[in-house]
């Protein structure tokens, strides 16, 4: 991990990437749910939501990891009261994340810097490599949840998470203000573009709890997030009111959900935790029971190509509750390994007339259902409809 802070000089580039991808794949198989907390703009309390969500999940006896990929402005160590914490080294030589509690571990760039106020002046490739190391080189162990605090916007860090953790869900954070609602739509469109399923939306700063009388005042309007979630067709997971103690708790390194469990804001976070648990299990069950499928078919024009291994183009369908919601025709880069590229497309099913044993085994190990012997030269639209209708067995 020392290479992260130093910028990873030298070494054979292709060998590094191959090793990283293998380690990342191995680590991710040990994590049941991955959630990226993101927002379209800064200042909406995204890190506060991520930290309190992670702590809240850990208080429900889930094993939780909290990964801060905001490389330029890491806030998680401060909010957990563990700035300049040291990464523990395991007996086997591997490095572990910082232990916050028996059920919660976290990692940030800050423990790897020579000084806590060091500036990170990195371009995209270095940031991408660092984030992959955070996942693959760190011994996270088995986790029920990995909560990822991403910086605002749709830049390198969220894109790297989307590509590195193709089965991650997005949790969108907004405030009731119109400008924040406009920006969160960009995050929504980002998720659709990179094929990341959206867990739901949280309206933060939804009302202000007066410290004197305890009444709630709508400083930043109210209800805009819920209306937007309904408009976009995604789940509304809760509204979090502003409590002056949120700031004090964050500055003192004591997350509000644990420090002031009797407060209205802590109760709102607890409801968010319950809703997140229910939503993640529902999304997982949708895949397991076939209500959600992302189907890839090798094609030449509109027709099914005979062998998946040789395809340079795939039709990819999003199928929800028996209907095709989205169809894309996507070219495969010539130098990309077929199995890893298909997994990056977050496919759940591959339909093909033929496939090599090696590629089938690799995709199956990644959780992809491979369905062979469909007729070549038929229209791909007809093939996916046959799958939906049960003519082609899942």
Image: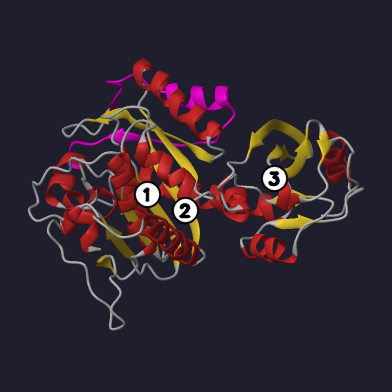
The residue that mark 3 highlights is 292
Q: Is 179 left, or right, of 296 in this rendering?
A: left
Residue 228 on the magenta span? yes
* Residue nearest the viewer, comparing 27 with 152: 27
The residue that mark 2 highlights is 34
Other-residue count near label 1 (Cα within 10 Å), few / some / many at <14 / 14–19 / ≥20: many
- The residue at 45%/40% (across/down) is 171
Residue segment shown in magenta: 216-245
Residue 33, visible in the rendered structure: yes
Looking at the image, do the residues carrying marks 1 and 2 touch, with CB atoms under 8 Å apart?
A: yes
Q: Is 154 left, or right, of 281 in this rendering?
A: left
The residue that mark 1 highlights is 148
Real-space Cα separation, disc 3 to disc 2, in angstroms: 18 Å
First-in-chain label (3 vs 2): 2
Location of residue 222 in the rendering, given as x and y in whole percent from the top left corner: 38, 22
Per the image, label 3 sits on a secondary structure element best described as strand
Against 302, residue 176 (above or below) is above
């Amino acid at each position: 991990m020392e290479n992260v802070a130093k910028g990873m000089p030298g070494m054979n580039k292709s060998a590094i990437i191959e090793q990283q991808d293998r380690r990342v794949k191995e680590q991710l198989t040990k994590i049941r749910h991955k959630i990226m907390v993101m927002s379209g703009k800064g200042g909406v309390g995204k890190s506060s939501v991520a930290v309190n969500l992670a702590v809240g999940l850990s208080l429900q006896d889930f094993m939780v990891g909290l990964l801060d990929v905001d490389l330029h402005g890491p806030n998680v160590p401060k909010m957990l009261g563990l700035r300049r914490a040291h990464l523990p080294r395991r007996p086997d030589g591997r490095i572990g994340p910082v232990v916050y509690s028996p059920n919660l571990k976290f990692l940030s760039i800050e423990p790897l810097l020579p000084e806590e106020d060091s500036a990170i002046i990195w371009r995209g490739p270095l940031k991408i490599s660092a984030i992959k190391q955070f996942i693959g080189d760190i011994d996270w162990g088995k986790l029920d949840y990995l909560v990822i605090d991403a910086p605002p916007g749709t830049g390198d860090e969220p894109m790297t998470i989307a590509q590195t953790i193709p089965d991650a869900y997005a949790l969108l954070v907004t405030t009731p203000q119109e400008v924040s609602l406009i920006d969160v739509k960009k995050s929504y469109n980002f998720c659709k573009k990179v094929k990341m399923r959206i867990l739901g939306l949280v309206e933060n700063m939804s009302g202000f709890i007066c410290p004197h009388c305890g009444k709630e005042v709508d400083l930043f309007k109210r209800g805009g997030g819920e209306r937007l979630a309904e408009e976009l067709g995604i789940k509304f997971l809760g509204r979090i009111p502003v409590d002056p103690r949120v700031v004090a708790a964050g500055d003192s390194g004591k997350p509000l959900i644990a420090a002031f469990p009797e407060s209205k804001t802590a109760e709102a976070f607890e409801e968010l935790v319950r809703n997140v648990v229910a939503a993640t299990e529902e999304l997982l069950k949708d895949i397991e029971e076939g209500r959600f499928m992302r189907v890839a078919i090798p094609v030449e024009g509109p027709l099914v190509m005979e062998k998946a291994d040789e395809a340079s183009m795939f039709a990819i369908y999003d199928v929800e509750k028996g209907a095709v919601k989205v169809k894309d025709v996507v070219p495969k880069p010539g130098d990309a390994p077929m199995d890893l590229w298909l997994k990056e497309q977050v496919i759940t099913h591959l339909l093909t007339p033929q496939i090599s044993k090696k590629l089938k085994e690799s995709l199956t190990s990644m959780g992809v259902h491979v369905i062979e012997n469909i007729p070549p030269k038929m229209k791909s639209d007809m093939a996916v409809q046959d799958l939906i209708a049960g003519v082609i067995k899942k």
